[in-house]
Image: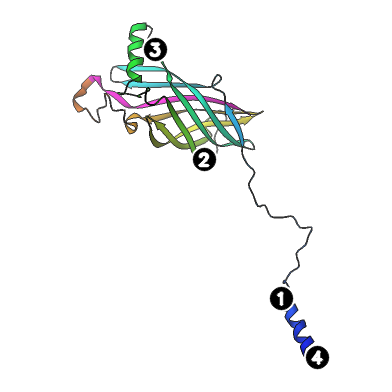
């Protein structure tokens, strides 16, 4: 009887034991992803230019970045958030001070960017897709993110040159924005069909050169 009990106990212990003993010297599986390093946008080194077109010509100018963070993992940009100071909006193609001031005032008014109520615009990256086979000095990434203007947030996508080198992250490119998506309808043929040669294009472009450092 004792022999039977001991045999049963031995069999049970064998069945309960792991099939393969774990090697304590084996490398452990990765349990976490390396956290990204945050680089700070340098407004004094970064530029943001705009171009708006109309039937009779176009106007262009600048806006300044206020702040921003860029997420970097290794030698790649993986994310970022950027804040633009809308009060810094300038027109650079009109030399007459009075005419220049009138256009800047109109662009800051509710017809356009409503700067008094919305002093900043923001862009937050949600996805970065590498462009395979991109040539040197050509766009190497497709950037997707959420753009907020006048308190309205819409997704936008554009190509860019992204680079990280010697503690500096940079992003260079041009984004085309449909202003009517942000309730900027003034002079748009989409909403005022009989406006004729006073029409202003729905799309405007933002050309950026962002510099961020550790």
Q: How many marks?
A: 4
Classify mark 2: helix, strand or loop: strand
The residue that appears at 52% across and 26% down in the rendered structure is: 67
Among numbered discs 1 and 2, the one appearing first in the sequence = 1
Q: Are marks 4 and 2 in contact (CB under 8 Å)?
A: no
Residue beneath disc 2 = 129
Among numbered discs 3 and 2, the one appearing first in the sequence = 3
Disc 1 to disc 2, how far (Cα)?
49 Å
Residue 180 is situated, as x and y percent measured from the top left of the image, at 31, 31
The answer to which of 84 and 23 lies nearer the viewer is 84
Instruction: Answer with the quarter of the image where residue 200 lies.
Output: top left
Residue beneath disc 1 = 16
Q: Which mark is residue 93?
A: 3
Label 3: how many residues lie within 10 Å, few (<14), some (14-19) or many (20+)? few
**The residue stretch that appears in magenta:** 197-214
Front disc: 3 or 1:
1
Residue beneath disc 4 = 2
Among numbered discs 3 and 1, the one appearing first in the sequence = 1
Among numbered discs 4 and 3, the one appearing first in the sequence = 4
The residue that appears at 65% across and 52% down in the rendered structure is: 31
Q: Where 54 sits versus 125, above or below? A: above
The answer to which of 9 and 51 lies nearer the viewer is 9
Q: Is residue 3 left or right of residue 204?
A: right
Q: Is residue 167 left or right of residue 93?
A: right
Q: Residue furthest left?
A: 194
Disc 3 to disc 1, how far (Cα)?
82 Å
């Amino acid at each position: 009887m004792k022999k039977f009990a001991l045999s049963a106990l031995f069999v049970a212990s064998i069945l309960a034991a792991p099939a393969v003993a774990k090697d304590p010297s084996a490398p452990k599986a990765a349990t976490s992803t390396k956290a990204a390093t945050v680089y700070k946008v340098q407004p004094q080194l970064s530029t943001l230019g705009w171009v708006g077109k109309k039937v009779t010509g176009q106007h262009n100018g600048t806006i300044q970045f206020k702040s921003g963070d860029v997420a970097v993992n290794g030698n790649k940009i993986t994310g970022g958030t950027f804040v633009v100071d809308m009060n810094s909006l300038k027109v650079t193609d009109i030399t007459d001070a009075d005419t220049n001031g009138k256009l800047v005032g109109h662009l800051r008014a509710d017809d356009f960017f409503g700067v008094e109520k919305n002093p900043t615009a923001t862009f937050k990256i949600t996805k970065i897709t590498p462009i395979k086979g991109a040539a040197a000095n050509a766009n190497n990434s497709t950037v997707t993110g959420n753009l907020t203007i006048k308190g309205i947030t819409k997704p936008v996508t554009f190509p860019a040159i992204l680079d990280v080198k010697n503690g500096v992250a940079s992003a260079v490119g041009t984004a085309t924005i449909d202003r009517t998506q942000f309730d900027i309808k003034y002079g748009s043929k989409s909403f005022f069909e009989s406006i004729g040669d006073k029409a202003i294009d729905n799309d405007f472009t933002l050309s950026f050169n962002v510099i961020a450092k550790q």
